Image (tube, grey):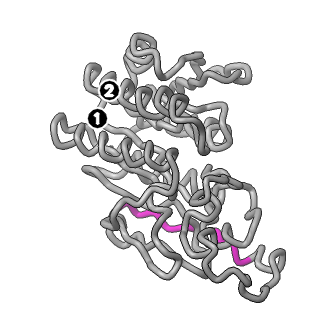
């Protein structure tokens, strides 16, 4: 998949799951630059279809519906599922069964590229004193994080067994601006998110790649050197927001897990911030 050598729009049809979510709404318009047709899917209501769009209301836990959803697409950007901590039974259907259904449908229909929205919460129990690269051990901070570890492992299996390439985006905190001091480290601007997806779709031979979705922030917990071949160069930074969260003295509770671990409040079972 090489953007520079493609005539016109490189993709005939791209599938976007989770199109009604925070990042799905940001990405939906951008995909029109790259595909003749964007097939947008969610269980939540979607805005009216543009001329280049096909809208599908699909529950990812419905295997037959997902098999139909994937038919005829060239590549998939999979943002669908639950993006916060939730009861296991809910996560099971949306994030585990749903992700399996998507990959199995991709296998059946010969789709060879998936961009999978993983999360920083797959590694949230690493201390904030560590800098992690793509080979860092999975240390999920929540059941939600566990489902993202499952998705990463499932995508690895489908690459090794069936040759379906995946870029796993360990998304930090992608909002219009950081909402708390932790997000000064995990912030991913919408513009950088869209560029990361573009790189993940257009880079040749990604194999199975893990990349951290984070802007060029002053303080870094994550090192993307091993995913450097994607060509992703973040343009934005949380530095412009630093004055919104003035420096404060360390917490009197020196053992506060939400400060010690990269997952923040997720490690307490109290998800105060969404990963995307």
Question: Which secondary structure, mark 2?
Answer: helix
Side of 180 where 93 appears, left or right: left
Question: Which residue is pictured at 41% across the width and 60% down the height?
Answer: 139
Q: Nearer the viewer, residue 265 or 118?
A: 265
**Residue 255 sits in quarter:** bottom right
- Marks 1 & 2, CB-CB < 8 Å contact: yes
**Residue 126 sits in quarter:** bottom left
Q: Residue furthest left?
A: 161
Q: Which label was assigned to residue 112?
A: 1
Question: Which secondary structure, mark 1?
Answer: loop
Q: Is residue 237 magenta?
A: yes
Q: Nearer the viewer, residue 212 or 227?
A: 212
Question: Which residue is pictured at 59% across the width and 24% down the height?
Answer: 42
Side of 163 where 78 appears, left or right: right
Q: Disc 1 and disc 2: Cα gap in Å?
A: 7 Å
Question: Which residue is pictured at 60% across the width and 39% down the height?
Answer: 86
Q: Position of residue 240 (x, y in %)?
A: 76, 76
Magenta range is 229-239
- Which quarter of the figure is the N terminus placed in? top left
Q: Position of residue 75 (x, y in %)?
A: 39, 33
* Image label count: 2
Side of 39 where 165 appears, left or right: left
Q: Is residue 158 magenta?
A: no
Q: Position of residue 110 (x, y in %)?
A: 26, 25
Q: Nearer the viewer, residue 31 or 206?
A: 206
Q: Residues within 10 Å of mark 1 (few under 14, many from 20)?
A: some
Question: Which residue is pictured at 40% across the width and 10% down the height?
Answer: 64
Q: Nearer the viewer, residue 208 or 34?
A: 208
**Residue 115 sits in quarter:** top left
The chief SS type of the magenta part is loop
Which residue position is annotated with label 2? 106
């Amino acid at each position: 998949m090489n953007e520079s050598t493609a005539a016109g729009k490189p993709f005939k049809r791209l599938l976007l799951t989770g199109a009604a979510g925070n990042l799905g709404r940001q990405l939906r318009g951008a995909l029109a630059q790259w595909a003749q047709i964007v097939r947008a899917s969610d269980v939540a209501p979607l805005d009216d279809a543009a001329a280049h769009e096909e809208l599908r209301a699909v529950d990812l836990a419905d295997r037959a519906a997902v098999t139909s959803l994937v038919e005829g697409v060239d590549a998939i950007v999979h943002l669908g599922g639950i993006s916060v901590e939730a009861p296991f039974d809910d996560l099971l259907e949306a994030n585990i069964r749903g992700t399996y259904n998507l990959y199995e449908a991709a296998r059946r229909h010969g789709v060879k590229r998936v961009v999978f929205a993983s999360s920083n919460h797959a590694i949230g129990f690493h201390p904030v004193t560590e800098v992690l690269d793509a080979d860092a051990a999975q240390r999920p901070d929540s059941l939600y994080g566990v489902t993202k570890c499952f998705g990463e492992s499932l995508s690895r299996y489908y690459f090794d067994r069936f040759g379906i390439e995946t870029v796993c985006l360990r998304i930090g905190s992608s909002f219009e601006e950081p909402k708390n001091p932790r997000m000064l480290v995990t912030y991913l601007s919408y513009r950088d998110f869209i560029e990361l997806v573009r790189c993940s779709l257009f880079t040749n031979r990604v194999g199975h790649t893990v990349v951290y979705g984070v802007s060029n922030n002053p303080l870094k917990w994550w090192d993307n050197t091993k995913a450097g071949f994607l060509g992703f160069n973040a343009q934005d930074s949380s530095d412009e927001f630093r004055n919104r969260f003035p420096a404060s003295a360390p917490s009197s509770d020196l053992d506060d897990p939400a400060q010690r671990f990269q997952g923040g409040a997720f490690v307490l079972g109290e998800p105060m911030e969404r990963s995307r």
